[in-house]
Amino acid sequence: MSIEFFTHDAYQRHNRRRQEHLASLMLPITGRTVLELGAGIGDHTSFFLDRGCRVTATDAREENIAHLRTRFPAGAARVVDVEQDFPADLPAHDIVYAYGVLYHLSDPLSALTRMAARTKEMLLLETCVSFGAEEAVNGIVEDVNDPTQAANGLGCRPTRPLIFSSLKRLFPYVYVPRTQPWHDEFPTNWLERAPANTTKLYRCIFVASRTPQTSVMLADRLLSIQTKE
């Protein structure tokens, strides 16, 4: 497999918009230990390294981890399949970072339980979702030959209510940002009719925490209307 999938302009633009948005949320990230799930070749890893974090970067594909180790030789990187039970020697971290991971899994609810078990302070989650007020997983098939997609070829497009309620069962405090990243895959009006274009991706971000978060950028309920600022 080739890392060219990770180098497309559209992919890199999407990463930049997500990272600048994460920085705007004013979360306590600096100096924390971070477990990065679905790290790919490490395009998000430097966000945390630049903030003095100790990062354990993981991915289900050995070839992605090999490239990540080349980019960050001093960092910790290992193969971890989020679809499976985590290795017994993988410790809990202050922050679990799972951007662009959940929708590549066939059983997202079990994965959230595994993520929560490794979270000391905060879970940062970004995923593709489906419009709708119901709680649904909405399984799909993905291209197993694309290293940015599901390692086993099965993914999902869960609804926001399903994710939010699942996180509420695992964490005492769950939030969504009041804002969305400046990217067209992040809607701001969730009251609209589900779009007819089923090929387009729609994304949302969640923050789950063991302690209350005081950032004014967060709402403790599932917002129907978000903004872009």
Image: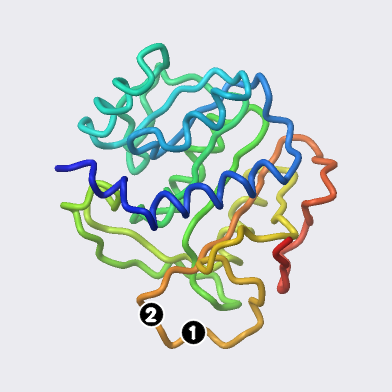
Of the 4 image quadrants, the one containing the N terminus is top left
Which residue is disc 1 drawn over?
Answer: 195
Q: Quadrant of residue 210?
A: top right
Figure check: 109 above or below 213: below
Q: Residue at x 38, y 80 (%)?
A: 198
Location of residue 197 by image quarter: bottom left
Residue 89, numbered label: none
**Vertical relation: 178 (above or below) 6:** below
Number of marks: 2
* Residue bearing the label numbered 2: 198
Query: What's the residue type where badge 1 is placed?
Result: Pro
Closer-to-camera residue (73/169): 73
Residue found 22% across the figure and 56% down from its top: 153
At mark 1, the secondary structure is loop
Q: CA distance from mark 2 to mark 1?
A: 7 Å
- Judged left or right of residue 200, residue 185 is right
- Residue extending furthest front? 9
17 with respect to 155 (left or right) = right
Q: Secondary structure at mark 2?
A: loop
Q: Residues within 10 Å of mark 1 (few under 14, many from 20)?
A: few
Residue 194 position (above or below residue 148) = below
- Mark 2, Cα crowd under 10 Å, few <14 / some 14-19 / many 20+, is few
Residue 149's spot in the image, x, y percent? 29, 52
Q: Position of residue 102 (x, y in %)?
A: 44, 51
Tell me if 214 is positioned left or right of 189 in this view. Answer: right
Q: Which residue is at 57% across, 60% downward?
A: 204
Are the two marked residues, 2 and 1, in contact with CB atoms closer than 8 angstroms? yes
| Coordinates of residue 164 in the picture (x, y in percent) | 63, 58
Quarter of the picture containing the C terminus is: bottom right
Q: Position of residue 90 (x, y in %)?
A: 43, 20
